């Protein structure tokens, strides 16, 4: 029987995590992407139940109190959390589950699932990160400023992670993520 596994993808907002993840899931549909809950409003192209479960702050607080979240954090004025049940069920069934989460959540997962593979995605530079957030064209000036503020602290924590990958050339970064996930660890 397959053994379930948890893989964590972290990196500053705008670095390209979502873009990399979409390509990774196309190449490897057997990987299970954990859809998070968030209090953030949906962006124009985002779909309920595909990108996130969009909930009110009240609903989010109830989920926290009921222990329904495996980890959660506040990021740039909104709450984000991983649904415990879907992840635990998938891992029990032997699936490889990917979480795309920010730094505080990744630290909580490290505490509770030390065997999770933790990957940190770095931008080629902070100015390129800003270009990408702006180029995405989906965040307000306030949201952009908050994201860039966070980015410095997140980048400083990159060495806490098992693997650091610079997302300069998309294809190369994707190949390195694939290698990190699918190459068996040697002893
Ligand atoms: P995140 O999920 O980390 O917030 P996104 O996947 O939304 O980031 O990417 C932010 C923007 O950067 C998008 O417009 C995306 O097309 C662009 N992008 C992602 N990877 C690269 C790359 N390697 N080179 C240039 N632009 C990229
Ligand atoms: P965005 O608003 O750009 O979709 O996401 C903002 C940040 O929240 C990103 O760094 C993203 O990885 C993170 N995030 C998304 N879902 C979760 C989650 O379930 N838990 C935590 N801790 N962070 C999340």
Image (tube, rainbow, N blue to C red):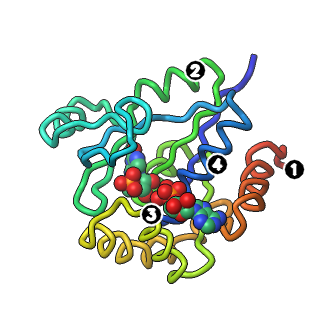
Give the CA distance from mark 2 to mark 4.
17 Å
Where residue 153 sits: x, y (%)?
42, 76
Residue 113 in sight here: yes
Callout 2: helix, strand or loop? helix
- Left or right? Give the position of 94 relative to 89: right
Q: How far apart are marks 2 and 3 (CA)?
A: 30 Å
Question: What distance separates the C-alpha of mark 4 from that of mark 1?
Answer: 14 Å
The residue carrying mark 3 is 13
Mark 3 or 1, nearer chain start: 3
Q: Tag 3, which secondary structure? A: loop
Q: Which of 118 and 115 is in front in this view?
A: 118
Judging from the image, what secondary structure is the residue with disc 4 in?
strand
Image x and y of residue 21, in percent: 60, 46
Query: What is the x, y in percent for residue 180?
Result: 76, 52
What residue did someone put label 1 on?
186
Instruction: Report crowding for label 2: few under 14, some 14 to 19, many 20 or more residues within 10 A (C-alpha).
Output: few
Residue shown at the point (80%, 51%) measured from the top left: 179
Cβ(mark 1) to ligand 1 < 8 Å?
Answer: no
Q: Mark 4 points at which residue?
A: 117
Of mark 4 and mark 1, the one earlier in the sequence is 4
Contact between labelled residues 4 and 2, with CB atoms less than 8 Å apart: no
| Residue at disc 1, secondary structure | loop
Q: In which quarter of the image is ligand 1?
A: bottom right
Q: Which mark is residue 166?
A: none
Disc 3 or disc 1, which is closer to the eye?
3
For label 2, the residue is: 92
Give whichever of discs 4 and 3 has the lower sequence position: 3
Mark 3 residue CB less than 8 A from any atom of ligand 1 = yes
């Amino acid at each position: 029987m397959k053994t379930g596994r948890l893989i964590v993808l972290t990196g500053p907002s705008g670095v390209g995590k979502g873009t990399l993840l979409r390509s990774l899931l196309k190449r490897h549909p057997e990987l299970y992407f954990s859809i998070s809950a968030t209090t953030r409003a949906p962006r124009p192209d985002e779909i309920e139940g595909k990108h996130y479960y969009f909930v009110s702050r009240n609903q989010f607080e109830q989920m926290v109190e009921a222990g329904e979240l495996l980890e959660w954090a506040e990021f740039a004025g909104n709450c984000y959390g991983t649904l415990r049940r879907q992840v635990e069920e998938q891992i029990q069934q032997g699936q490889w589950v990917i979480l795309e989460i920010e730094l505080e959540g990744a630290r909580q997962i490290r505490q509770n699932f030390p065997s999770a593979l933790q990957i940190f995605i770095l931008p080629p530079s902070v100015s390129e990160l800003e270009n990408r957030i702006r180029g995405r064209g989906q965040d307000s000036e306030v949201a952009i400023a908050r994201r860039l503020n966070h980015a410095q602290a997140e980048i400083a924590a990159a060495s806490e992670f098992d693997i650091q990958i610079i997302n300069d050339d998309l294809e190369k970064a994707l190949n390195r993520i694939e290698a990190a996930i699918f190459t068996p660890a040697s002893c």
